[in-house]
Image: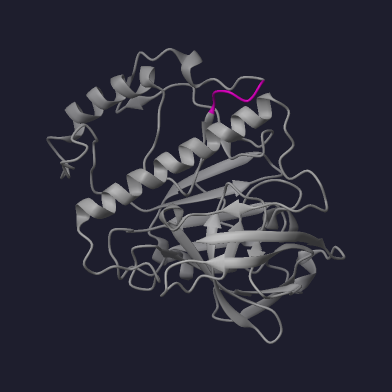
Amino acid sequence: MLLSIAQIITLSSINPTNASDTSKPQRLTAKLIHRNSIFSPYYNPNATVWELNQEALNRSREHMRYYQYRMTALRENVGLLDSSDMTLGLITSDAGVIFLASMSIGQPPIPQLLIVDTGSSLSVLGNIASEQLLFETTDGGKIPVPIHVFGCANTISGPSNSQESGLLGLGLSRFSLIRQLGGKLSHCFGDIHDPKYEHNMLVFGEGAVLEGDVTPLDTSRRLYSVSMEGISVGDEKLNIDPSIFKSQTLGDGGVVIDTGSTFSVLAKGGYELLHEKVQSVLDPSLQRITYSQEPGLLCYKGQSYNVGYDIDGGKMYVQRIDCELLHS
């Protein structure tokens, strides 16, 4: 998909908490559709497991290159989306799409499929100018929420059967939709290998699911960054030099959370020790998928997790849970 963004429009600021008068915060939700789901415009019923794995690996490498660019820009003091009025070009390739958000925009509401991107702070649409997003609530209702910053795209292209109409930016600059919706966000990913699975969920605002284990969240680089002090497998802490994962003052280092990357990328000094230990522990008990084109990769069947972000509080929550439970 190609998005050529013409401008960023700033409208009057409206507090999203006024959208609901109930004492208990409503969960503002959007259904997340994985690119390989039967509900996705990218769904290919003929794709093999190996082809899907290769696509996922290529996406992860694309995102890694993008974040390397971000770090370089930070070191060189290049401003990224700091102006309130600008023109820029943004290219999101079809191969880089991993999740789509299903939501309605405008009055009357128009259903949209938006590419979810934690690397962008802009929410960009095609030939639509609107000040209102319509979110679903967990009780089956819908609630309109005013927005005051969005982008307008003058060129959108993609596959002939493509249905997505823009970009849902979940980045952390002052333009971000997250900032406009209260600074809290959670997302739950279930079985992405099941093309019929339909319970992946994105939740904004005070209703975000902030439960489970918690770790400090660093947003100083406008990235979802966490501090990794070490890696343990079972009860054994691996003998990895802690400086490998330490954030540096000029943008290098650290660990970035990226919903657009299927594969994790580690510095060599940490990866080799982890690879060896994980293989020795999991091979006897879990089903491993061997990828012929990348035989060194360790692939196992996974588990659902909900991840919540408290931007203002500087915390990230991780909870092992079935995403279907969040609909109740």
Residue 59 at x, y percent in the picture: 40, 47
Residue 265 position (above or below residue 121): above
Q: Is residue 262 visible?
A: no
Residue 321 at x, y percent in the picture: 40, 54
Q: Nearer the viewer, residue 280 or 322?
A: 280
Of all residues, the one furthest to the left in this rendering is 284
Identity of the residue drawn at 39% across and 15% down: 240
- In magenta, the rendered stretch is 250-254
Residue 153 position (above or below residue 70): below
Identity of the residue drawn at 24% across and 24% down: 277
Of all residues, the one furthest to the bottom in this rendering is 108
How many marks on residues? 0
Q: Nearer the viewer, residue 301 or 111?
A: 111
Q: Nearer the viewer, residue 285 or 128?
A: 128
Question: Within the image, what quadrant is residue 131 found in?
Answer: bottom right
Question: Within the image, what quadrant is residue 132 found in?
Answer: bottom right
Q: Is residue 296 magenta?
A: no
